[in-house]
Amino acid sequence: MSRSLNFQLGLLHFAHLLMSADGKIDEQEKAMLERIRNEEEIPHTLYTYFLNVASRLSEQQSYRTGVERLNQCDEEEKLSAFVHLYRLAQADDRMDMKEVRFLLYSLKQTKIEFEDVMLSARLSGAGSVNQLHKRVA
């Protein structure tokens, strides 16, 4: 399924912010991002473009851009982005409080319900509420 450019770029902005939220980007997170990129068919050229643009943005600018991009998406795309972000946050087998805060604040800014993300994540096999509570550091 081909997603919109806003979805792909919004997801990339949020993914990179989430990956660096705990102060370290590990190999599991990099591998998960690669899987997400493959699942969503994000072209290498777009990813390279994103990395070039993102390297010149502050965290706040990147966050605002991610919010703006995702808010231009339909509800299904926004929900899908947050399921991917949830999977990404779990990639290193623990969720840092900074990652949890980032996800919750981002959900509020994009008007997506946490419960909807958890249900979709459960249905897609990405995790459960119990795993979230166990993994929060």
Image (tube, rainbow, N blue to C red):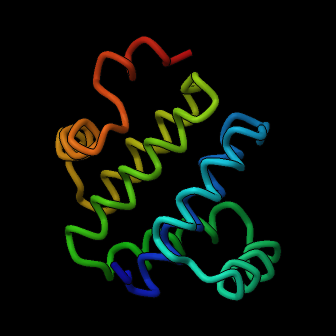
Q: From the viewer's perspective, is residue 109 above or below residue 85?
A: below
Is 31 on the left or on the right of 15, as rendered? Answer: right
Q: The C terminus is located in which quarter? A: top right
62 w.r.t. 16: above or below: below
Looking at the image, which residue is at 39% across and 23% down?
A: 132
Instruction: Identify the residue shown where x is 25% and y is 41%.
Output: 114
The count of marks equals 0
Q: Nearer the viewer, residue 62 or 40?
A: 40
Q: Is residue 106 left or right of residue 12?
A: left
- Most extreme residue toward the top is 134
Residue 110 falls in image quadrant: bottom left
Residue at (38% x, 81% y) in the render: 3
List x then y, in percent, for residue 105. Answer: 40, 47
Left or right relative to 117: residue 100: right
The answer to whether residue 90 is above or below residue 67 is: above
Q: Nearer the viewer, residue 66 or 1?
A: 1
Residue 92 at x, y percent in the picture? 64, 30
Q: Position of residue 63 (x, y in %)?
A: 56, 64
Q: Position of residue 78 (x, y in %)?
A: 31, 65
Quadrant where the image shows the N terminus:
bottom left
